[in-house]
Amino acid sequence: MTTAAPAVGRGRPLEGRIGWLERTLGGITGNIEQAIFTEHHARSDGWLQRRDPRAKMIGLLAAILAASLTTSVAGLALLYAGTLAAARASRVPFAFFVKRVWLGIPFFAGVVVLPAIFFVPGPRIFDLALGPAHLAPSWNGLAGALIFVSRVGVSVSLAVLLVVTTPWADVLKSLRALKVPQVFVLVLSMTYRYIFLFLHTANGILLARKSRVVGRTSGGEQRRWITGTMGNLMSRAFKMSNDVYAAMLSRGFAGEIRTYATYRLRTSDVAALAGVAVVAAAAVLVGRLLP
């Protein structure tokens, strides 16, 4: 009589035991795919894609400055409406653009500004006694928190729009054109490149692990594997970074970011920059006229 082999992990599917590995792989792959999608979209034919990168950078700085100076939600709403109109004209997917900003910004900005709701003086929304303490948020604190979160959301939306519609090499070259120190641009460039180096290396390690997991592993074994993998990842990434840097030096790299693109400021670029300046000034004036 043949006895059937007992099912591995009866009552719980095998996938559930390595779900963390699959989720990590999915997250890494998703980040790489999103970056590839962003670079592909930056080279498409849209309104902002056709503008000079230097004009886009100056317009971004002007709009962010206006967002930091305006003191009303109406002014921030005007800036955000202009941002959405520019994203629409540049053929940026609406859902992708909005979700990328507003899924995380309200939470993190809200955590930072939450105490101000309770400590800013003004008319109270309610007064809740919790033992010796009193929970009494004010309308002034709530209004200030709303302006802060809106300001952060608008500023991040502008930065995301610039990155989505501009190749990364052009962003770096624009920073150099605006006299940003070379060492800052170089560090930013290397950081961006080595992020993907880490992602590709980690993706290979995790994929190799997944292909070899055929049964249940204990928690201690998983922790030992994770600890060893962290050291292995650092060692491999460090060695590969040295190899990449040596290859860059052998090809003539001297610390300056160079691209094949040649910039030429056209009339349409100046007109777009003037339009951004008008919207930014209007947002600041609206903030001064409306409470």
Image: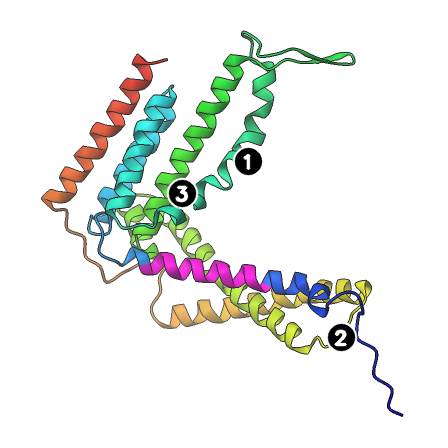
Q: How is the image coloured?
A: rainbow
Q: Earlier in the sequence, mark 3 or mark 2?
A: 3
| Residue 26 is covered by the magenta coloring | yes
Amino acid type for the residue under numbered disc 3: Val
Question: Quadrant location of the C terminus?
Answer: top left
* Rendering quarter of residue 278: top left
Q: What is the span of residues highlighted in magenta in the rendered image?
A: 25-40
- State the residue at coordinates (59%, 69%): 236
Identify the element where label 2 is drawn: loop
With respect to residue 272, does 112 lie above or below? Answer: above
* Amino acid on which disc 2 is placed: Gly
Q: Which residue is mark 1?
A: 107
Question: Disc 3 and disc 1: Cα gap in Å?
Answer: 15 Å
Q: Secondary structure at mark 3?
A: helix
On residue 215, the disc is 2
The residue located at (42%, 51%) in the rendering is: 188
Residue at x 81% of width, y 69% of height:
10
Task: Please tell me whether the stretch drawn in magenta is mainly helix, strand or loop.
Answer: helix
Expressed as whole percent of the image width and height from the top left, the position of residue 265 reads: 14, 47
Can I make out residue 194 in this image?
Answer: no
Q: Position of residue 74 (x, y in %)?
A: 34, 22
Marks 2,1: beta carbons within 8 A? no
Q: Is residue 156 left or right of residue 137?
A: left
Residue 162 magenta: no
Q: Residues within 10 Å of mark 2 (few under 14, many from 20)?
A: few
**261 to the left or right of 159:** left
Q: State the CA–CA distance, disc 2 to disc 1.
A: 39 Å
| Residue highlighted by disc 3 | 98
Pinpoint residue 177: horizontal percent, then vertical percent. Answer: 26, 47
